[in-house]
Image (cartoon, rainbow, N blue to C red):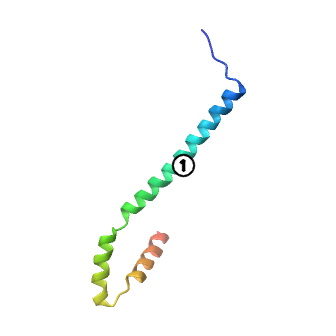
Amino acid sequence: MSSIQANDSDTSAFLTALTRISDQQKTICAQLDELLLLMQLPSESVLQVLRGLLLPMNSNIDVLVTTLQTRLGEA
């Protein structure tokens, strides 16, 4: 049975590749987290409809959004 011995250069290249893969996975995970968050938020068209509904009730959409963000941040 034969074995392959890695030299220092091979080991360094392998560790560099693993580090690069790990960094890419971190980036992808962060992007997936952001995508999931965006999917949980109402779309812009929903917000436009809500703004149209709130105007006659003298409610400010910006105040509502800020309040919602604050409350969601507390959860």
In this view, 6 is above or below 39:
above
Q: Which residue is mark 1?
A: 26
Would residue 5 appear left or right of 35 to someone viewing this image? right
Q: Kindly identify the residue that appears in the image at 31 percent across and 87 percent down.
A: 55
Q: Quadrant of residue 22?
A: top right
Residue 72: percent from left, percent from top = 44, 70
Q: Kindly identify the residue that appears in the image at 55 percent across and 40 percent down.
A: 21
Would residue 73 appear left or right of 23 to someone viewing this image? left
Residue 11: percent from left, percent from top = 67, 29
Toward the top, the furthest residue is 1
Q: Kindly identify the residue that appears in the image at 38 percent across and 86 percent down.
A: 60
Could you tell me which quadrant the N terminus lies in?
top right
Of residues 31 and 66, the one nearer the viewer is 31
Tag 1, which secondary structure? helix
Callout count:
1
Toward the right, the furthest residue is 8
Of residues 73 and 51, the one nearer the viewer is 51
Residue type pointed to by label 1: Lys
In this view, 21 is above or below 53:
above
In this view, 45 is above or below 64:
above
Of residues 68 and 75, the one nearer the viewer is 68
Residue 12: percent from left, percent from top = 68, 32
Residue 35: percent from left, percent from top = 41, 57
Would residue 68 appear left or right of 52 to someone viewing this image? right
Q: Kindly identify the residue that appears in the image at 36 percent across and 61 percent down.
A: 39
Mark 1 nearby-residue class (10 Å; few <14, some 14–19, many ≥20): few
